[in-house]
Amino acid sequence: MARANRLRELRRYPSAIAGAAIILLLVITALTTIIVLPYDRAIDLWRGGEGVWLDNPRNARPAWFNVLPWVNLPRTVIVDSRDGDITRTIRPGEEVSEFAMDLTFDYRADAFPQEVTVTLFGTFDDLGPYATLTWHTPDGRMIPLGDRPAGAQTVVRLSQDARLIRRLTNIPVEVGLFSDYTVDSSTVVKGRYRLEVDGFLFEPDSDIDVKLVVYGQVHGLAGTDHRRRDISIALLWGTPIALTFGLVAAVGVGITTMIVAAIGAWFGKWVDSLIQRITEVNLILPLLPLLVMVGTFYSRSIWNMLGVVILLSIFSGAIKTYRAMFLQVRESPYIEAARAYGAGGFRVVFRYMIPRILPVLIPSFVTAIPGYVFLEASLAALGLGDPVLPTWGKLLDDARVNGALYNGHYYWMIQPAVLLMLTGLGFAMLGFALDRIFNPRLREI
């Protein structure tokens, strides 16, 4: 009943309510991510399995940038004849058949796309189709893009075509195709564009499909990185990883440290002396350099790092604080009563001593969680993060290495940094409120 009353006192602290709301939002995000985007699928997406990045623009800003009234950046446009919406015409011949198809789309953005690619998918036995590409603009101009033989999958990167660049008077292809470059190459020509594809089929059963990709400057909820990966994958999966790492480390270290301190305080003598000497030696050892050594010479797995963190944090300065508390509890009358009726040493420790101070230590568990979350992010930012898992720290490291801030890709670094700050803020506000409630020295009269 007393504990329930203490928890009801949280309503008196707006900071605690705000902190609990932030934590609840993070927990809901973590659970939803695990259900909607399973681990194997997330890793496959993040590592680029099945060519999932190919249609994503490189270093694109989040799509919500277009919500701003003065921003109208292009989204990626994909037109694929395999979707069934494209009408193709085939004129059979005795030996050679002719084909023709049009891929059309509307372009209404104020800025130019990043790049343009055309992929030809040929179906044949010996002789592949031959295609001629022609670009039609909304104002009626026609720009020849050249002739291409179609293999099983032939990617034509128009933005890197040197002949096309010279034909467009040495301006970028994506600018020349979407502007009247002979008059003004700085203004986008808006309207309906058309890619005309025609050519020849040299075998009776041969066929061809075409996919046009116009890469935009915005993509998804969080944008993309230098490898075309969707940053939202790391932001979402970084949430359960960060919460799990912080919670397991904080609870594991806190409970283990408390048990060790209680055993030393109860049994005393050489047991307590040994624990104190180990603690003093461990206090001299720097945690971060040791973790750097483990990550460099042994393994960068996040779970191995978690085990090392717990092992090195058990004999920390907190063990002396807990010991002082347990020395006071050991002299309590109910402890003497337990000893009088013959309770063993470990029964006294686990049944009477630890439960006595456990409520006081709950706030320390809560406030310790963001510290371990920041530790994992710091290791990843130093290049010692898990090479497989997408985490917030890994995003920060990739952004730093690739000069995100210098190149204007602020979203890449700001988004994981904001999530880290929110996590720390939520647990800190809730922890400080719990400290006022459970710590009798801070409880308001």
Image (cartoon, helix red, strand yellow):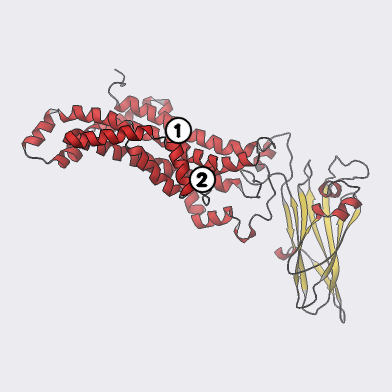
Q: Nearer the viewer, residue 141 or 200?
A: 200
> Could you tell me which secondary element the residue under label 2 belongs to?
loop
The circle drawn on residue 385 is 2
| Residue at the spot 38% in from the left edge and 30% down from the top edge | 431
Q: Nearer the viewer, mark 2 or mark 1?
A: 2
In the image, farthest residue toward the bottom? 94
Amino acid bearing label 2: Gly
Of the pair 332 and 27, the residue shown nearer to us:
332
**Which residue carries the number 1 mark?**
426
Q: Which amino acid does label 1 sit on?
A: Gly
Q: Which residue lies furthest to the left in this view?
A: 341
* Cα separation between marks 2 and 1: 24 Å
- Residue 386 left/right relative to 191: left
Give how far across and how far down residue 22 sits, in percent: 46, 35
Q: In this view, does 213 lie to the left or right of 98?
A: left
Q: Which of 17 and 251 is in front in this view?
A: 251
Q: In which quarter of the image is the C terminus?
A: top left
Q: Which of marks 2 and 1 is nearer the N terminus?
A: 2
Circle 1 packing at 10 Å, graded few (<14), some (14-19), many (20+), is many
